[in-house]
Image: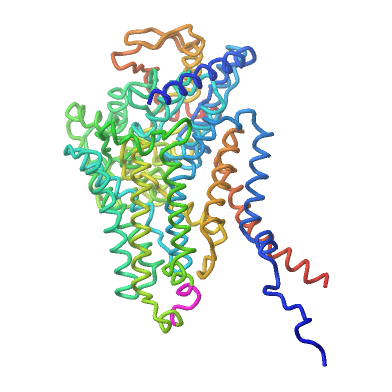
Amino acid sequence: MTDVSNHHVPDRLTTPLQRTLRSWESLLLAVAVAIFLLNTFASPYFLNAWNLSDATFNFTEKAMIAFAMALVIISGEIDLSVASIIALVSTAMGAAAEVGVGTPGIVLIGLGVGLACGAFNGALVTGLGLPSIVVTIGTMSLFRGISYIVLGDQAYMNYPDSFAWFGQGYVFWVITVELVFFLAFAVIYGVLLHKTNFGRAVYSIGNNPVGAMFSGIRVKRVKFILFLLTGLMAAVASVCLTSRLGSTRPSIAFGMELEVVTMVVLGGVNILGGSGSIPGVVIAAFVMGLVTFGLGLLNVPGIVMSIFIGLLLIGVIALPRLWNQFRQARR
Amino acid sequence: MSIFRKALTTATIAATMVAGTAQADDMRIALVVKALGIGFFEAAAKGAEEAAEELGGVEIIYTGPTDTTAEGQIEVINSLIAQQVDAIAVSANDTDALVPTLQKAMKRGITVISWDSGVAEEGRQLHLNPSSNPLIGNMIIKLAADHLPDGGDVAVLSATTTSTNQNIWIEEMTKVLPNYPGINVVATVYGDDLADKSYREATGLMQTHPDLKAIIAPTSVGIVAAAQAVVDADKVGQVNVTGLGLPSEMAGAIESGASKSFAIWNPIDLGYSATMLAHSLASGAAEAAPGAEIPMGRMGTLTLDENTNGAMADPFVYDSSNIDEFKSIF
């Protein structure tokens, strides 16, 4: 009879280090570092604190929405109306500024409109049980349509000087207000998704909504809150973007929803729901920002840039699968 | 704030020093357009290259976003600021939204002018209009009226509701409308500068207004789509398509008779003049101030008004007599 106590039984089949190294986030981080190095060699203007600071504007606003969008997509839903919420929020803030409301009031009105848009989406999805992709394609036209009706070919531009702080201000040296917002929200959403009961509920709903319901998770309420959050984050992005542009036109942020979804998917979030992480989205934001800025410095035409982002997305998603197939074939 | 100012000043000084050394090689002038892949702007880039050759020691960076958004243009301009180019000449997608970014460019010692589609006064040193708005507004209605001695119903097919240029021209056209008795403008529709939408809007106009005599499209995309719609509806000879278009794209419409005449300034001249002006300002040979007269090579001189706007030339009419000569140029 063998002594059972002599058998070494491991706690895990892979060590945490191995898992980290094999994770999506490490792959993305490697891509980000590679792009950073390539950019440094490709252009003499890349490694400059002010230039890099300017470059962060390429992704900060989109990334703030991407955090909330990641949670929505992990829960198995999607919100395609975010860019239109930006337009409607911006229009509401512009109208408020026009009648002389101060900066705090403008921001509060903006956040309120964003929450209302999110609540509208959430109510249609959870209350009536409609598919979110249909609902938000509808509200995508609805929200921007209202902006077009209000503004037509006009623009709001009477924002108070202090309003410029959000999109044009610096906290210190080259660190912009938007970058600080981006980092703060990264931490907030990281904690919310990875360290709270709410976050675990989001994962379980994405994996199996019926199972989640039988486990005592209030599925509809969680989903409603997620749509509120995307509405709120779209409003925050709208405050930043409007402040950066110093004006509102109904065409503001046109087409941004697809860039946000691209960022989320590139960040390793499963488009079908159930898995993904905030650190992944953060790195994806940097990757997209670095690629567009680096190619911009080389004066690469925008259409080539879109092709590059598309190839990057397909490449980063396909590589791990190809690698797995390759390893299995060799066994 | 003072720390920020100090840092900014240091950056500006550093930028000017680097720009100073860069000038020893070539002066880099960036021609930023609304979107790449538009015939009009490709022609303007040709003109810019012509000016660069004439001046010598000038490198032209021809760039722009993929779609006509202000956000896309801001990303492009940010990367140009980072490259410390000497001058930016921009045709803006949005009058106001580019202002903060362009002000940043000027703070860092870059010459900024707008051309074709303007930027608000505080965001550039001067604006080069291809022509004057009242002249264009008058020209587009005159083109329609010339072929309607007895008057009739006409409609406008514009670009987007937010297009700066088109809105001003339509406004100017409305002002001079009383000079053309018998001409009624029955509708203004928007094709968003998309070929398919413009085509549908033009078809819709002919259906809702059966007595329509002319479609005025002050956009190079809309006019071609409208001419095609007239041909497809078998209304050549009944409905005359006119407005602003490119000779190369309109040659077919002139041939088929769907369009009797149209007008445009020469985009080659426009890109040429913009480059000449940017060079004059960036090299310090001229200063942009109200009333200033700045030379622009073979195009004469540009006189700035009190808002530092200047008009290059009158729009030019193209018809069957001269279309063959110009269609191969742009």
User: In the image, what residue occupies the spot 40% across and 61% down?
Assistant: A79
- Locate residue B60, reporting x and y percent: 57, 23
- Locate residue A74, reporting x and y percent: 48, 66
* Prevailing secondary structure class for the magenta stretch in the rendered image: helix
- Rendered image quadrant of residue B147: top left
> Is residue A231 placed above or below A209 in the rendered structure?
above
Towards the viewer: B200 or A205? A205
Read off the magenta span: A204-210
Left/right placement of residue A306 relative to residue B302 reads right
Colour mapping = rainbow
Could you tell me which quadrant the C terminus of chain A lies in?
A: bottom right
* Residue B16 visible in this rendered orientation of the protein: yes
> Is residue B112 placed above or below A75 in the rendered structure?
above
> Is residue A271 placed above or below A188 in the rendered structure?
below
User: In the image, what residue occupies the spot 56% across and 41% down?
Assistant: A292
Left/right placement of residue A200 relative to residue A159 reads right
- Locate residue B256, reporting x and y percent: 45, 41
Left/right placement of residue A270 relative to residue B160 reads right
Could you tell me which quadrant the N terminus of chain A lies in?
A: bottom right
Towards the viewer: A151 or A235? A235
Left/right placement of residue B157 relative to residue B12 reads left
> Is residue B89 placed above or below B198 in the rendered structure?
above
* Residue B257 visible in this rendered orientation of the protein: no
Q: Is residue A223 magenta?
A: no
Q: Is residue A205 magenta?
A: yes
Considering every residue shown, the one lying at the far bottom of the view is A1
